[in-house]
Amino acid sequence: MRQFFLAIALVGALSLAVAEAMAGGPPVVNQADHLIGASLEPEVGINCGTGQATLITGTFGGVIHTLVKADGTVHVNGAVRGSAINDDLPVPDGIADASTTFTSSFNDIFRASGGEVHHFTLNGVGTTATGAGFRFHVVIKLLLDQNADPKVDFVRLTCF
């Protein structure tokens, strides 16, 4: 008898879960974008090969997947790979002080309630103008509550 009531409770719970899941409806947007030869926005960063501030430019390609749910929640994730040139500052002279190749993955959630979750990783290898090799790893994690107040704000750059 106990198993019978347990089975009925399980069927009832599953029915409730399915009904709640279906109430949200299908995604409003579910698309994948395939990027080829996209340009990196010029950005100031650190040249792991020289230790100097540098202007980073380059290109990348990959896949970005966007899912917009019926409740307004947006989920964006992707993976890209590319190459970049580092032109050390204070005055970029147009001569590459290092060249790199990289892979990156990211996962972003923008909740309908206002909270956000962001995860980003970047791994790469490079060579300086003198031929010295180096590697780098970047991790970024950000969690914002419904008021856009940061609950987790973590950035780490490792050069080796």
Image (cartoon, rainbow, N blue to C red):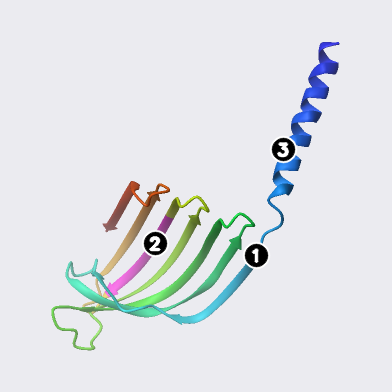
Q: Position of residue 150 (x, y in %)?
A: 33, 48
Q: Is residue 115 left or right of residue 4?
A: left
Quadrant of the frame with the N terminus: top right
Q: Judge whether residue 22 is colored magenta.
A: no
Q: Judge whether residue 122 is colored magenta.
A: yes
Looking at the image, is mark 3 or mark 2 nearer the viewer? 3
| Inter-mark Cα distance, 3 to 2 | 37 Å
Q: Is residue 70 left or right of residue 103?
A: right
Q: Is residue 116 left or right of residue 138?
A: right
- Amino acid under disc 1: Asn
Residue drawn at point x = 79 percent, y = 19 percent: 6
Quadrant of the frame with the C terminus: bottom left
SS type, badge 2: strand
Q: Is residue 146 above or below residue 105?
A: above
Q: Position of residue 27 (x, y in %)?
A: 67, 59
Residue corresponding to mark 1:
30
Q: Position of residue 145 (x, y in %)?
A: 40, 47
Residue corresponding to mark 2:
122
Q: Residues within 10 Å of mark 3 (few under 14, many from 20)?
A: few
Q: Is residue 119 above or below residue 48?
A: above
Asked whether 97 or 32 is in front, the reply is 32
Looking at the image, is mark 3 or mark 1 nearer the viewer? 3
Q: Residues within 10 Å of mark 2 (few under 14, many from 20)?
A: some
Residue drawn at point x = 61 percent, y = 69 percent: 32
Provide the major secondary structure of the magenta segment: strand
Find the magenta span and give its range.
119-127
Residue that extends furthest to the top in the rendered view of this protein: 1
SS type, badge 1: strand
Q: Is residue 146 above or below residue 106?
A: above
Residue corresponding to mark 3:
17
Q: Earlier in the sequence, mark 2 or mark 1?
A: 1
